[in-house]
């Protein structure tokens, strides 16, 4: 014996029947990748594997190269027309992986079209262009993110947590070595080729309120390549500490190490050691005034050496670029600044230009205490620290 069941609907509301094949709206963020050269294919692959993103376009002046990247059966469209990409209302965000000279023009056009922007480093070639993009993104309420990929590796994220959490104490030094044999670049020196990695990491892990205030650089071209192949970069930090970066195209061995010394602990990161990339050393030097000394000689503090345990934190191996795409999508969805926003890209760019200027001046220190591009690059303090600083 059957019965009739009537589904009552509210005015203007549709109740789908059980087993309905009605298609739900796609809430993923529509994305276009611009540039199918060296880095673009990596962006394409990771965008397609990020649940919050839907890749609609791959744009490149060489459409045959785009199609080769996408493969024969891809549903992603290829085009040589950037205007066509920006005119597509499905596209809410653009990821730019082109030569740096085109970054400003392409990113500005996307922001003017109301699109969020992820741009490969360096964010632009000049400080003025970078400041222009930051200001425009702020004005339009759009996300502008710089692809500082190393900052999204599990090890650097863990370093940032240790530094910002105060577990290593006050920063006393930062020392990085990034050397290998080649590749000598045809258009930039070793500073602009390799140092952006270490400078972006330094910018990412420094605690709020600590920032570079001066830059000096030394470089050499011993093989006559017409550009610096070996360079040493020193940054004086606002708390009195020093940061040092050594970059080199001519080393027969590859070295990727970073040491961050704190008043309580020291971090040692060896990126070529997958078994123990990060080690936390409870070792250091303490300056302790002894109680038994008289006031007259109390300034003669005794130096004591602390030797403790070494701990290697467990790190889950993840592809950094996947985390970049996830952070980009999350920043758009949550309406917040990404971890490596346009200001971070601007700060790193400013350090690179100061280093180049130092080379022109024979290694003289270039101060960074002047106007900071209308306040665009100042490192932001958390609300509670701002209140304390007043």
Image (cartoon, rainbow, N blue to C red):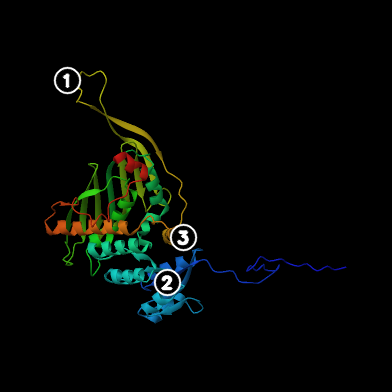
Say few, some or many: other residues with alpha carbon within 10 Å of mark 3 (under 14 / 14 to 19 / 20 or more): few
Disc nearer the start of the sequence (3/1): 1
- Work out which quarter of the rendered image holds the C terminus and state it: top left
Residue 223 in the image: x percent, y percent? 17, 64
Question: Looking at the image, which residue is at 36% across and 64% down?
Answer: 140
Disc 3 versus disc 1: nearer the observer: 3
Disc nearer the start of the sequence (1/2): 2
Of residues 138 and 339, the one drawn nearer to the viewer in this rendering: 138
The quarter holding residue 42 reads: bottom left
Mark 3 highlights which residue? 333
Q: Is residue 124 visible?
A: yes
Disc nearer the start of the sequence (2/3): 2
Residue 269 in the image: x percent, y percent? 35, 48
Q: CA distance from mark 2 to mark 3?
A: 17 Å
Say few, some or many: other residues with alpha carbon within 10 Å of mark 2 (under 14 / 14 to 19 / 20 or more): many
Of residues 317 and 365, the one drawn nearer to the viewer in this rendering: 365
Mark 1: secondary structure: helix
Position above or below: 265 against 224: above
Mark 1 highlights which residue? 296
Of residues 116 and 165, the one drawn nearer to the viewer in this rendering: 116
Mark 2 highlights which residue? 32
């Amino acid at each position: 014996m059957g019965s009739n069941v009537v589904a009552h609907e509210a005015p203007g509301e549709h109740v789908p029947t059980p087993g309905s094949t009605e298609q739900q709206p796609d809430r993923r963020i529509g994305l276009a990748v611009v540039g199918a050269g060296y880095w673009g294919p990596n962006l394409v692959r990771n965008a397609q594997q990020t649940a919050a993103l839907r890749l609609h376009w791959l744009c490149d002046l060489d459409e045959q190269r785009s199609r080769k990247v996408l493969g024969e059966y891809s549903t992603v469209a290829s085009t040589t027309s950037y205007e066509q990409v920006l005119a597509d209302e499905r596209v809410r965000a653009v990821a730019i992986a082109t030569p740096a000279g085109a970054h400003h023009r392409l990113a500005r056009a996307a922001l003017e079209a109301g699109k969020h922007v992820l741009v490969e480093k360096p964010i632009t070639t000049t400080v003025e262009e970078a400041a222009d993009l930051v200001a425009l993104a702020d004005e339009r309420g759009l996300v502008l993110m710089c692809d500082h990929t190393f900052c999204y590796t599990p090890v650097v994220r863990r370093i940032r947590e240790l530094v910002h959490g105060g577990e290593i104490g006050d920063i006393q030094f930062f020392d990085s070595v990034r050397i290998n044999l080649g590749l000598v670049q045809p258009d930039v020196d070793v500073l602009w080729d390799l140092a952006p990695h270490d400078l972006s990491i330094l910018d990412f892990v420094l605690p709020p309120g600590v920032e570079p205030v001066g830059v000096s650089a030394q470089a050499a071209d011993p093989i006559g390549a017409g550009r610096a192949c070996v360079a040493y970069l020193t940054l004086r930090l606002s708390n009195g500490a020093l940061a040092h970066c050594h970059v080199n195209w001519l080393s027969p061995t590859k070295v990727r190490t970073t040491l961050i010394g704190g008043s309580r602990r020291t971090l040692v990161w060896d990126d070529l050691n997958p078994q123990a990339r990060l080690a936390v050393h409870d070792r250091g030097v303490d300056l302790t005034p002894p109680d038994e000394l008289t006031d007259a000689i109390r300034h003669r503090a005794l130096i004591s050496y602390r030797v403790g345990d070494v701990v290697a934190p467990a790190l889950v191996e993840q592809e950094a670029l996947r985390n970049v795409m996830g952070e980009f999508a999350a920043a758009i969805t949550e309406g917040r600044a990404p971890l490596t926003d346009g200001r971070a890209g601007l700060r790193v760019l400013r350090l690179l230009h100061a280093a180049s200027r130092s080379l022109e001046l024979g290694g003289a220190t270039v101060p960074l205490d002047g106007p900071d591009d209308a306040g665009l690059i100042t490192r932001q303090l958390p609300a509670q620290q701002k209140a304390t600083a007043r």
